[in-house]
Image: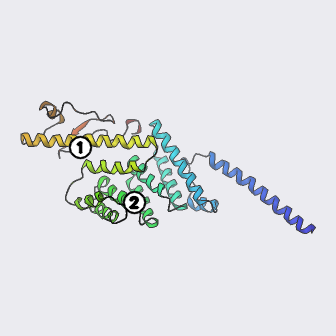
Amino acid sequence: MIKNASISFLLIAVFVLFSVNLEKQRDIFVKSNFVEYTTPSKIIGPASLEFKGLTSDYLLFKFMTFVGEKAAEQSEISSKQWDNLIKTLDTITDLDPYFWDAYLFSEMFLAWGAGKIYEANRLLLKGTRYLPKKSRLYYYLGFNHFYFLKDNKKGSKYLMQASKLPGCSPYVANLAARLSVYAFEHRDGIMFLREMLKDTRNKTIRDRFKMRMITLEIMESLESKITVYYEKYGVYPASLEDLVIKGIIDNIPKDPYGGKFMILQNNRVYTTSNMLIKEMK
């Protein structure tokens, strides 16, 4: 009886000591700035025990908090911080490979926010292994290839895969079919951003996407006016000022990002801002 009581007391003492140490470690984890250092999934995975889903939720919350604050402040995210953010998304999807939001944020923030297309594509491909029926994964992969990487062949391949899955818009199949024939149109970017907005709840991020969409709409409108000029005069305008001189437009629109719209040699409209907010360059 005494022996059993001693064993029970010893077990309770070990449990209490372990719990105190665990609480200390959790407190350090909560207060730490994960952007400066990221714990690899091979370490954090076993430490999470049966709470891998909860841990991945927490890490994504930290990710969103950091990126959201930076966006609200319009302050720069350093190269090292982006590297750690990417590692964080890797850790999240290692802990919970079926966590859709992590793949969505890979597209939002890595591809569109940081221009890290290859890293975004790698994570999206990872998602297709676990969520093979999620059409948006293939849609994002296809869009990234033809829009950012100018690879129409791969872009068409992924978009075709997306178009065959349930819930995919007919627009995707049409886009895939014409990639090998037509150059990219701003309308495609506008349609893509509209789709992204459906999945975006954060106001700051929504405002960013809306700003980019408005800019693309301005560029699309200007290119249509360039076509009007060509049809009327038989030559393309040398600059946007020519459209004003001929009365085709009243004035040259302002770039929401603070840059300047101009006509390239291929008669497409470009902006010197590259659709990046100045403070984040």
Please give the name of the residue rendered at 41% of the width and 39% of the height, measured from the top-left corner.
Answer: 280
**On screen, 54 above or below 228?**
below
Please give the name of the residue rendered at 12% of the width and 39% of the height, measured from the top-left corner.
Answer: 229
Between 258 and 160, the one lying in front of the other is 160
Return the residue at label 2: 137
Q: Does the rendering let one see residue 108? A: yes
**Could you say whether the residue bearing mark 1 is in a helix, strand or loop?**
helix
Give the colour scheme shown.
rainbow
Q: Residues within 10 Å of mark 2 (few under 14, many from 20)?
A: many
Quadrant occupied by the C terminus: top left
Please give the name of the residue rendered at 28% of the width and 55% of the height, measured from the top-left corner.
Answer: 150
Position in image of residue 30 (x %, y %): 63, 48
Q: Is residue 227 left or right of residue 89?
A: left
Report the number of numbered marks: 2
Q: Residue furthest right?
A: 2
On residue 98, the disc is: none
Q: Quadrant of residue 4?
A: bottom right
Position in image of residue 197 (x %, y %): 39, 47
Quadrant occupied by the N terminus: bottom right
Q: Residues within 10 Å of mark 1 (few under 14, many from 20)?
A: some
- Disc 1 residue type (three-letter): Glu
Q: Quadrant of residue 231?
A: top left
On residue 220, the disc is: 1
Q: Is residue 36 left or right of residue 153?
A: right
For the residues labelled 1 and 2, say whether their Cβ atoms are less than 8 Å apart: no
- Disc 2 residue type (three-letter): Leu
Between the C-alphas of marks 1 and 2, the distance is 27 Å
Position in image of residue 45 (x %, y %): 59, 61
Position in image of residue 237 (x %, y %): 13, 38
**Could you say whether the residue bearing mark 2 is in a helix, strand or loop?**
helix
Between 159 and 16, the one lying in front of the other is 159
Q: Does the rendering let one see residue 263? A: no
